[in-house]
């Protein structure tokens, strides 16, 4: 089992390190697209907004799109700073706002509103490896299964040819073509390509490529 764990960490979790790697971000759960939709009826609405979209990226840039009930779209953008207690937004014109917030893997509570994170691609589902190639790929690895839930929780199982397997569970993030897995032992990111029902994960440092097929 210890050998299989080592294979798992070397093969799947030892992923490329880049200057803008998501793993370097202080509060990675904040990254992504967050949406709020008003549940109020038009005749009883207490504010003019029907929906709000918040976007935070790893370059500390934010964007807010607010859809009014009359169909007009209001936008704001700038930079931000964040720690585990407060979120500070700078609009680029000298003004800033500081907000307390609460955050988990797929919900952000801000200013009394609860935002839900949505996937940019159709990554959710169960994926099973067709092939795994690379100089660090052990012959003892029989296959990999990856379950990505729409609420940003994942489970990955690595199977050995001796019949044993090990499973890691945690939270995943998506930004651009980067997929980051956060689990108990650490956090690392890889690049992905999604074409129809085929998911390709690449590790440019180790020359590893895993091709996974969506299971139906």
Image: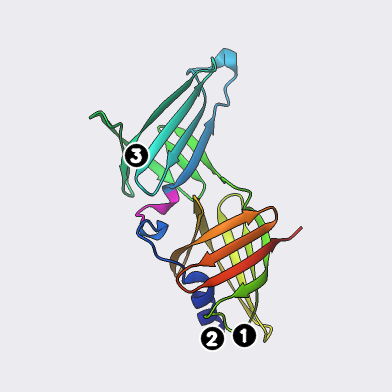
Q: Which mark is residue 3?
A: 2
Q: Residue at x 41, y 56 (%)?
A: 22
Q: Is residue 79 left or right of residue 124?
A: left
Q: Residue at x 62, y 53 (%)?
A: 123
Q: Which mark is residue 11?
A: none
Task: Give the quarter of the image for residue 74.
Answer: top left
Task: Give the quarter of the image for residue 186.
Answer: bottom left
> Disc 2 and disc 1: Cα gap in Å?
9 Å
Q: Main secondary structure of the magenta part?
A: loop
Residue 148 percent location from the top left of the image: 61, 57
Label 1 crowd bin: few (<14), some (14–19), many (20+), radius 10 Å = some
The residue beneath circle 3 is: 100
Of marks 3 and 1, the one in the foreground: 1
- The verdict on residue 192 being magenta is no
Contact between marks 2 and 1 (CB within 8 A): the answer is yes
Label 2 crowd bin: few (<14), some (14–19), many (20+), radius 10 Å = few
Contact between marks 3 and 1 (CB within 8 A): the answer is no
Picture quarter with the C terminus: bottom right
Q: Secondary structure at mark 3?
A: strand
Quick one: label 3 or label 1, which is nearer the N terminus?
Answer: 3
Residue lying at the far top of the rendered structure:
43
Chain part drawn in magenta? 25-29
Of residues 210 and 148, which is closer to you in this image?
Answer: 210
- Whether residue 87 is visible, yes or no, is no
Of marks 2 and 1, the one in the foreground: 1
Q: Is residue 103 left or right of residue 85?
A: right
The residue beneath circle 1 is: 140
Residue 15 percent location from the top left of the image: 46, 68
**Protein image colouring:** rainbow
Q: Secondary structure at mark 1?
A: loop
């Amino acid at each position: 089992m210890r050998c299989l764990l080592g294979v798992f960490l070397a093969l799947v979790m030892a992923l490329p390190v880049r200057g803008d790697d998501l793993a370097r971000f202080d509060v990675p759960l904040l990254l992504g697209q967050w949406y709020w939709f008003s549940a109020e009826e038009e005749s009883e609405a207490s504010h003019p907004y029907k929906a709000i979209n918040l976007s935070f990226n790893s370059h500390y840039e934010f964007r807010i799109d607010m859809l009014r009930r009359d169909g007009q779209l209001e936008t704001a953008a700038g930079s931000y700073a964040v720690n585990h207690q407060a979120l500070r937004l700078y609009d680029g014109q000298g003004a800033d706002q500081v907000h307390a917030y609460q955050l988990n893997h797929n919900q952000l509570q801000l200013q009394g509103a609860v935002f839900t994170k949505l996937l940019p691609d159709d990554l959710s589902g169960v994926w099973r490896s067709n092939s795994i190639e690379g100089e660090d790929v052990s012959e003892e690895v029989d296959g990999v299964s990856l379950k990505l839930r729409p609420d940003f929780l994942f489970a990955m199982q690595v199977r050995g040819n001796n019949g044993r397997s090990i499973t890691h569970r945690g939270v995943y993030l998506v930004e651009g073509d980067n997929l980051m897995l956060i689990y108990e032992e650490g956090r690392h990111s890889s690049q992905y390509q999604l074409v129809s029902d085929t998911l390709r994960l690449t590790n440019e440092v180790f020359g590893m490529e895993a091709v996974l097929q969506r299971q139906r």
